[in-house]
Amino acid sequence: MSDLASRTLTIEKIFNAPIQLVWDAWTQSEHILKWWAPNGMDIKVIQHDFKIGGKWKYAMPMPDGSEFISEGTYKEIEKLKKIITSADFKPMTENVELQTYFEADGDKTKFTFSVVHETAAYCKQQEEMGFYNGWGSALNRLEKIVHTLNK
């Protein structure tokens, strides 16, 4: 296993929708608001500068009055193909890279989402903290948004 493989968690999905709709749902603030946070939680888009070098920052108000902050900087964007961004999810996950790949398959979209961690140990810790459950549920909500857009 390569070092990169031991530091990466990946979820693959097939969306029953054209690639443009999946791309839009992943990249446009009005859609991100509907799927980025866990069920029953709200999210605020503080900044979303979708370009290479652009920053994004979302805040999720917590029941205790604090805010859970997600933020990063776009490193690579290849329209309808890939998005690579740095990411911090304070206070739980810091200094990771999100790699999102989109591939058209007729009127469906093959979607691959990976999170690259600094070390294999940190990666394992994130997996044990519920990576697949958390991101899996977010991607299920994304799938519902895409389905709504595809009508």
Image: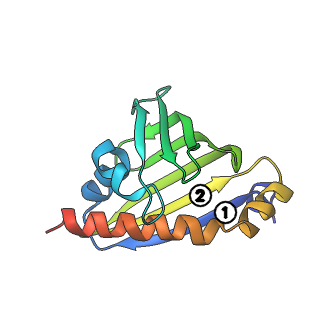
Callout 1 amino acid: Leu
Pinpoint residue 115: horizontal percent, then vertical percent: 63, 54
Near-viewer residue (78 or 69): 69
Callout 2 amino acid: Ser
Pinpoint residue 73: horizontal percent, then vertical percent: 54, 32
Which residue position is annotated with label 2?
A: 114
Using a 10 Å C-alpha cutoff, classify the residue at mark 2 as few (fewer than 14 neighbours), some (14 to 19) or many (20 or more).
some
**In the depicted structure, whether residue 79 falls above or below residue 124:** above
Near-viewer residue (113 or 125): 125
At 78% from the left edge and 46% from the top edge, which residue is drawn? 118
Pinpoint residue 107: horizontal percent, then vertical percent: 24, 70
Q: Is residue 133 left or right of residue 2?
A: left
Q: Earlier in the sequence, mark 1 or mark 2?
A: 1
**In the depicted structure, whether residue 134 falls above or below residue 76:** below
The furthest residue to the front: 64
Q: CA distance from mark 1 to mark 2?
A: 5 Å
At 39% from the left edge and 67% from the top edge, which residue is drawn? 141
Q: Secondary structure at mark 1?
A: strand
Pinpoint residue 70: horizontal percent, then vertical percent: 55, 43
The furthest residue to the right: 121
- Label 2 near label 1: C-beta < 8 Å? yes
Which residue position is annotated with label 1?
A: 9
Q: Secondary structure at mark 2?
A: strand
Q: Quadrant of residue 91?
A: top right
At 44% from the left edge and 66% from the top edge, which residue is drawn? 39
User: Looking at the figure, which quarter contains the N terminus?
Assistant: bottom right
Using a 10 Å C-alpha cutoff, classify the residue at mark 1 as few (fewer than 14 neighbours), some (14 to 19) or many (20 or more).
some
